[in-house]
Amino acid sequence: MDTTARWCTATELGAGYRSGALSPVAVTEELLATIDDENPVINAFCLVDSDAAMRDARESARRHADGIPVGPLDGVPVSIKDLFLTAGWPTLRGSELIQPEDDAWTVDAPVVARLREAGAVLLGKVTTPEFGWKGVTDSPRCGVTRNPWNSDRTSGGSSGGSAAAVAAGLGPLSVGTDGGGSIRIPASFCGIVGFKPTFGRVPLYPASPFGTLAHAGPMTRTVADCATMLDVLSGFDPRDWWAMPTPTTSSAEKLALAPDHLDGVRIAYSPDLGFGTNSPVVQRNTEVAVDALRGLGASVTEIDLSWSDPAWAYHILWFSGADVVVRALGPGAHEKIDHGLAAALARHAGFSATDYLDATAVRMALGVEMGNLHLDYDVLITPSTPRVAFEAGVDVPAGSDSPDWTSWTPYSYPFNLTGQPAITVPSGFDDDAIAPLPTGLQIVGARHADDTVLRVAAAYERIAPFRTREGAR
């Protein structure tokens, strides 16, 4: 076990608490001190509540001392993306148009309520771009969130605060949202695990303005932690009319019993979905990962999907939702929001009901195609993103021929259109000897096949484990 609590996984912390080798109080104190030291550089946390965290930790310590922990996350520190309602804390969503005194909510979003019920230690809230609108994390209220591997680079987004916090050792777990890649993009850029479960598996409240594109899910350092956190977050909540029934089995237990090999697992590999273009290092690391999956016993077939980019359909659905958010803030709001968001809304305006139905038809057709694909293949493999993290503080990489964030992350939003489970796991690094940047491998499963996705990810992780900035674990 790592003797520095900062780099312990949730699984390791739980084992340490049960044996008495670790204490929730000491672990929380260490993490709060680390946040105090390092957050000014990466800007992952926008709110830290030390008093509440220590109160949670002391209550957990008492339960462990009495031999009655409430579950595997009892005493484990976690951060909350600042799009989720959290009782006692404001939910400011990266916007200067929302004032803390106007937004001191008294209810928890379902994910927050479940984490409290599980005995987790809530450290605070982490950053998001304004209303979670884009694939990097900077906002008028909180400024720029940076990549722990290289602070000149972006953490990705929109769950960039979550990814940066986990990657920097500021807590082993965070909960994020994913409406077009917002868990997977920053997890890939920061070299951690990020999972977008099947739509409806993790309930949301209030309903997202982005509708059925929006998912919530775990962001962790290991697949085992991801499965454990998914068990906590999953299940029916009456406030979410899309919520699936509570699972009757445990993803974490299934994963623990899964074989190390992938014999019999059928994998389709698409390097580009038919319309993406990868950097050489992403292509190299993805091919190495695919070969590793073959070595684990999987049957891997490279396929040519020949898709046309569905970004136009995604934009209709996404920016219609964003426009609803901004309009609700009253007259003049467009002049006060993130300039990039205002420009995007101007570009993507005037959609009709027919446009919306046409976009919905595209997502239905993609869903049918992916449903048929999964008759022959258990999972689809792609790169998570086609490049490593670029400069912090900009919406698109230098030299981009499009101002839209979707232009540089082609492999994420298609699977929000289809509602499928998709995970990113670290696949390696680029060749920078001083500040190497991570790359990610995306594993996509059929709807409701979340456990299959986790199994493939865990098998790969065993031969390509998480690395801290201090070196390989």
Image: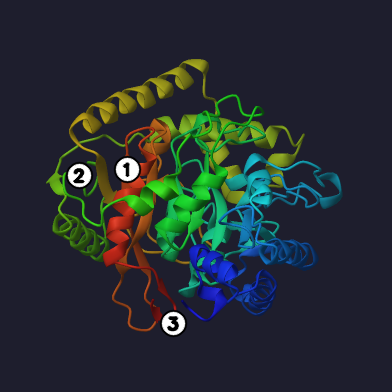
Residue 130 at least partly seen: yes
Badge 1 or badge 2: first in the primary sequence:
2
Which element is circle 3 on?
loop
Location of residue 238 in the rendering, given as x and y in whole percent from the top left corner: 65, 27
Location of residue 280 in the rendering, given as x and y in whole percent from the top left corner: 22, 64
| Foreground label between 2 and 3 | 2
- Extreme-top residue of the structure: 354
The amino acid type, in three-letter code, at marker 2 is Val
Residue 410 at least partly seen: no
Name which residue lies at 42% across and 57% down.
224
Which element is circle 2 on?
loop
In the rendered image, which quarter is residue 397 located in? bottom left
Count how many numbered circles sit on residues in the image: 3
The answer to whether 270 is drawn above or below residue 189 in the figure is: above
Q: Which mark is residue 452?
A: 1
Verify CB contact (< 8 Å) between mark 1 and mark 2. Answer: yes
Q: CA distance from mark 2 to mark 3?
A: 34 Å
Location of residue 116 in the rendering, given as x and y in whole percent from the top left corner: 69, 50
Which element is circle 1 on?
helix
In the rendered image, which quarter is residue 207 located in? top right
Q: Which mark is residue 470?
A: 3
